[in-house]
């Protein structure tokens, strides 16, 4: 059997090098990442997924599933790339507060469907990030301090396992696999659909307030005030931007999950600072959550680094607040805590994160900037030293990094055992594999 034969065994699309649509189909959302794959397969159903896995095992290929390529790493040359665009269903059971979502769906569609019932999923900052990759990696955003990791809200996953068998995995049917799938990444099976809990959110208030970069110290002090002892309904992120051609800025982004009057009261100190150059505060629906950060939704070339911070002491202020953002585009600090720091009853492989803040550094992944951006990542890392634990949220891992940074040694060991047992021939490959 040759790779060409996939065209007969798979009913959905199969694109091979030389086909007119191959290059765009192989290109991930992060256009800074090049991936030279052997084929792009767009399965129509679980049977097609099984056919791909069977062929890959026999021919010695690995299978990489990427709904969007937001988390692409570029080290998958020769792999068969699965695009899940045909798994596109979104069903909301408002009474049971459960969503059943195909593995090709992006968060914006889930949020729009849930918001129509006054409900929310545990989405992140960007509506075009895929539900599946985000959730398999843990997934945290504006709703996480109150409701925890997206992975822990999962009630079932429909998968095709490495042996090609379709299964509905729940806490009862297969506790080990269910545990691994909730935060351990995409190494264990190919997901075709997820079922997860939705949360009531009749009122949501939030937005962005922005100042000129010179105000960074004052805005930072306010950020510390707002995030110290904040209720779990309030999430606040600090952002510094230096976009080429625009004046550098500093911003506070926040979401309050509740009565807007209380949200306004809790953040009233923001008005006292004066000199505000942009203010998008207002009522939002869960479907509009992406408006707060207004991140790019079109494919973009990005280089990033994620870290967890132990505190916001002097070294952090000097490195992240006082020095210019360039050659980076954005320095983001997210206040964590709340439900993210607590063990969740029956929770998955993600587990709690007790560091109080997450750091996300972003640069443009264009060839002439790469070296400067990478150098700056290294300088910041060195300067922050012991203020970083070295641990990272799985979804904030960057190309070249290892899944080992996302888990404690016992969790990693358990994930590796499950991987060895469930996929002994390593046919399925996550963007950050758990195996050594
Ligand atoms: C602009 C932007 C904003 C972001 N915001 C947040 C945020 O607020 N919070 C957060 O936690 N993360 C955030 N992320 C990180 C994001 O969650 C990860 O990059 C995640 O992997 C994206 O999932 P995806 O399915 O879109 O990406 P893809 O690159 O398509 O998939 C990533 C990986 O997920 C696994 N996977 C996906 N689908 C399947 C499947 N069907 N079966 C098996 N494995 C599968 C695979 O290992 C795959 O390589 C953001 C990323 C970007 C670029």
Image (cartoon, rainbow, N blue to C red):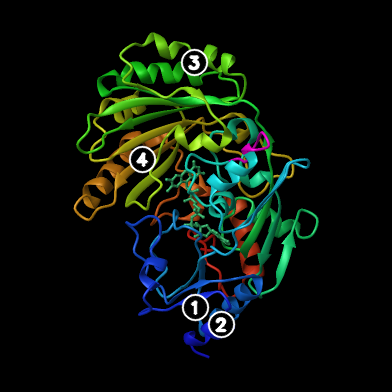
Front residue (pair 98, 189): 98
Sequence-wise first label, 2 or 3: 2
Which of labels 4 and 2 is toward the front?
A: 2
Q: Residue at x 48, y 39 (%)?
A: 125
Question: What is the x, y in percent for residue 279?
Answer: 39, 21
In reply to whether residue 167 is colored magenta, the answer given is no
Question: What is the x, y in percent for residue 232?
Answer: 60, 25
Q: Which residue is mark 1?
A: 61
Residue range corresponding to the magenta coloring: 115-122
Using the rendered view, name the quadrant where residue 29 is placed. bottom left
Q: Label 2: how many residues lie within 10 Å, few (<14), some (14-19) or many (20+)?
A: many
Relative to 85, residue 97 above or below: above
Question: What is the x, y in percent for residue 337?
Answer: 57, 30
Secondary structure that dominates the magenta span: loop
Q: Which residue is mark 3?
A: 267
Q: Which residue is mark 4?
A: 361
Q: Which residue of the protein is positioned furthest toward the front in this rendering?
A: 116
Relative to 404, residue 380 above or below: above
């Amino acid at each position: 059997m040759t790779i060409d034969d996939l065209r007969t065994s798979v009913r959905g699309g199969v694109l091979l090098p030389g086909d007119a649509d191959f290059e765009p189909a192989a290109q991930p959302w992060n256009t800074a990442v090049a991936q030279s794959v052997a084929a792009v397969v767009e399965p129509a159903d679980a049977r097609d997924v099984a056919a791909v896995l069977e062929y890959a095992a026999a021919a010695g290929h690995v299978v990489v599933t990427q709904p969007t390529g937001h988390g692409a790493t570029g080290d998958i040359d020769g792999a068969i790339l699965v695009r899940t665009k045909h798994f596109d269903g979104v069903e909301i059971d408002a009474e049971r507060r459960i969503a059943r979502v195909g593995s090709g769906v992006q968060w914006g569609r889930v949020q729009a469907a849930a918001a129509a019932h006054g409900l929310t999923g545990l989405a992140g900052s960007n509506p075009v990030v895929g539900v599946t990759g985000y959730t398999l990696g843990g997934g945290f955003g504006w709703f996480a301090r109150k409701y925890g990791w997206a992975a822990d809200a999962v009630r079932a996953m429909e998968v095709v396992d490495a042996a090609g068998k379709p299964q509905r995995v729940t806490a009862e049917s297969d506790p080990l696999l269910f545990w691994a799938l909730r935060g351990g990444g995409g190494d264990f099976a190919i997901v075709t659909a997820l079922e997860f809990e939705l949360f009531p959110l009749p009122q949501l208030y939030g937005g962005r307030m922005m100042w000129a970069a010179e105000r960074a110290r004052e805005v930072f002090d306010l950020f510390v005030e707002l995030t110290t002892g904040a209720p779990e309904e309030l999430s606040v992120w600090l952002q510094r931007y230096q976009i080429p051609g625009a004046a550098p800025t500093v911003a506070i982004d926040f979401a309050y999950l509740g009565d807007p009057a209380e949200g306004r009261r809790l953040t009233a100190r923001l008005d006292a600072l004066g000199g505000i150059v942009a203010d998008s505060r207002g009522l939002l629906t869960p479907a509009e959550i992406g408006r707060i950060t207004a991140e790019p939704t079109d494919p973009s070339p990005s280089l990033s680094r994620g870290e967890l911070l132990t505190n916001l002491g002097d070294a952090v202020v000097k490195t992240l607040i006082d020095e210019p953002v360039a050659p980076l585009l954005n320095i983001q600090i997210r206040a964590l805590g709340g439900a993210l720091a607590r063990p969740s009853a029956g929770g998955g492989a993600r587990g709690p994160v007790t560091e109080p803040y997450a750091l996300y550094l972003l640069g443009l992944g264009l060839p002439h900037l790469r070296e400067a951006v990478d150098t700056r990542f290294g300088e910041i890392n060195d300067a922050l030293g012991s203020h970083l634990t070295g641990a990272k949220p799985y979804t904030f891992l960057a190309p070249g990094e290892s899944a080992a940074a996302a888990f404690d040694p016992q969790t990693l060991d358990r994930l590796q055992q499950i991987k060895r047992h469930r996929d002994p021939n390593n046919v399925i490959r996550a963007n950050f594999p758990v195996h050594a």
